[in-house]
Image (spheres, coloured by chain):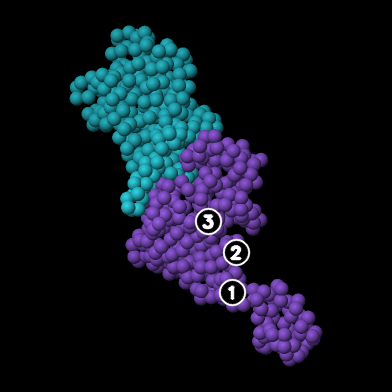
Amino acid sequence: MTTISAASRNVQAGIADTRISDEIRVVGMVWERELIRYVRTRTRIVSGLVQPVLFLFVLGYGMSGLVGSTGGFNFREFMYPGVVAMSVVMTAIFSAMSIVWDREFGFLREMLVAPVSRTSLVLGKTAGGATVAAAQGTIMLVLAPLVGIHLTPLLVAEVIGLELLMAVAMTTFGVFVASRIQRMESFQVVMQMLLMPMLFLSGALFPLNNLPEWLTVITRLNPLTYAVAPLRQQVFAAQNMSAAARARFPTNVTLFAHTLPIELELAIVVVFALVFFVLAFRGLSRTE
Amino acid sequence: MDRREQHLDGTSPQAIDVHGLTKRYGALAAVKDIDFSVGQGEVFAFLGPNGAGKSTTIKMLCTLAHPTSGQATVAGFDVVSRAKAVRRHIGLVFQEQTLDDQLTAEENLRFHAVLYGVPHAQIDPRISRVMELVALSDRRRDLVSTYSGGMSRRLEIARGMLHTPKVLFLDEPTVGLDPQTRALMWEDVMRLRDEEGVTIFLTTHYMDEAEYADRIAIIDYGSIIALDTPDALKASVGADTVELETADDETALAALQREGYTVERNEGGLTVFVADEEAAVGPIVSTVGVLVRTVRAHRPTLDDVFLHFTGREIREQHGEAVPMFARAHGARRS
């Protein structure tokens, strides 16, 4: 009899072991920490701006001379949405990679030994990284007039939404990679080996049409391709572009000779994000 | 009520209860079949050299490692079946720092409070309280990166106490701290025990540190080889002694024996065996009745205790104790 009562009490206690409201608070706290750290390191905000600006104005001007303009639309305007995406991606990955720092400085342990679920920790980290990355991407919008891109309130809202989705996918990807990296030295190497190819082969910096077959295959396997295209489509849709310019700078992604609708592109990003989330969760569960 | 049920509902009178706890890593048994229990509010020290099994034991008790066999309850909860409940009721201070130094002390504590489910209304008063306990109230809003090593460690102890745990685990809490900071930290720990009634379980390889504990378990090669209060452990090694050199040992010996002292005569002089060396020196000197040249009182130290039980001295981590380390490494490699 005592055994039964003890067992049932155990079950009740087991349910009480996980309190949803506590887990939500944890997600919020991890998110808040990312924001505090982002706001506190101003150098990071500035350096996060420098590289995209360099690409936009230096490379952009250089390439504009080569490519010329079509119907009053030049290469800088083409690049602009890609450079916004670039700053989102870099901030998201950098934010996720801070897990490597947390491991080095021990704070990861403080989180992992706490009586909370790993899901909450990864969710909080993802939400934090995504918020910070979208903020960084939104700061880039102040450059729009300098490039000749017209912004409307609706477009800004759409861009922020797309930035968030892109940032979520990239943060979960970053957390997954970071959870597999044990040492800080490996971080730079992995950054260079993954981040730059992903950016170059996403259509962010040049159009993906007319690439050799093998390169085309790689671009279609790159999750970022499906996040960059919708951003550019929405930005271009709000511009007053000639038909010639639209033909010169295509925005659509084709897969097996089909042009993907924006909904499908976004769905693909969501699927990638979910897969990376599971991988990130698994990666963190292996630790400790 | 049988023992099992006590464990399940968290009302076991012992803060820590361990039976036949064993941890193997392949062929190496890091912890072999240890038994002990720690009462509520006790300060309990695990003393032993590096590689003796201290960290492995603490990891099992904190649910960070699964026991190979045996049973352990902490705060009344089984460390395997109720791991999450155990974690909520313990505070942990690791050997290495686990603070975010880009956050302020307060932010670190707030983060911890949320992780451990401290109710919202209690977070602020609780932060004030623990910062007071470790005497860091005036540095509450400073970034942890501006803290010294000792302050960080004390902040970690404060954090470990934030969610009012039943048991606070300190793994080598004073490694790398200077003697002054160590003394300060111990003041903090004792204050915690007295004011919050928390049970403290610590591991150390410093003899003088183990002295602070109510009871000490000496662990070596994964087994507990002695467990008692510091005084009882020292007493088990031998009595206190007072050594005398006098102008006339013969007369002094006779005088002392008349008074009922146990005295031994040796080359250098006389050795008197007493219960308490400090209290005995005065009466002895006035009893001998002859000129006393030198007096040396000696009480066995924990070094003597360790030497007695293991046949060798405990050494610092610099690898001086060659046989000990050679064996530990060899075992791991095989």
Q: Residue at x 44, y 36 (%)?
A: A22
Q: Chain of mark 2?
A: B
User: Which of disc 1 and disc 3 is earlier in sequence?
Assistant: 3
Q: Are marks 1 and 2 on the same chain?
A: yes
Q: Nearer the viewer, residue B200 or A267?
A: B200
Closer to us: mark 1 or mark 2? 1
Three-letter amino acid code at the position of disc 3: Gln
* Residue B48 pos. (x, y %): 51, 65
What is the three-letter code of the residue carrying label 1? Ala
The alpha-carbon separation of the residues under discs 2 and 3 comes to 19 Å
Residue to which mark 3 is pinned: B40
Q: Quadrant of residue B264?
A: bottom right
- The label on residue B57 is none
CB contact under 8 Å: marks 2 and 3:
no
Provide the secondary structure element on which disc 3 rests.
loop
Measuring from the top left, give residue A19's x and y in whole percent: 41, 37
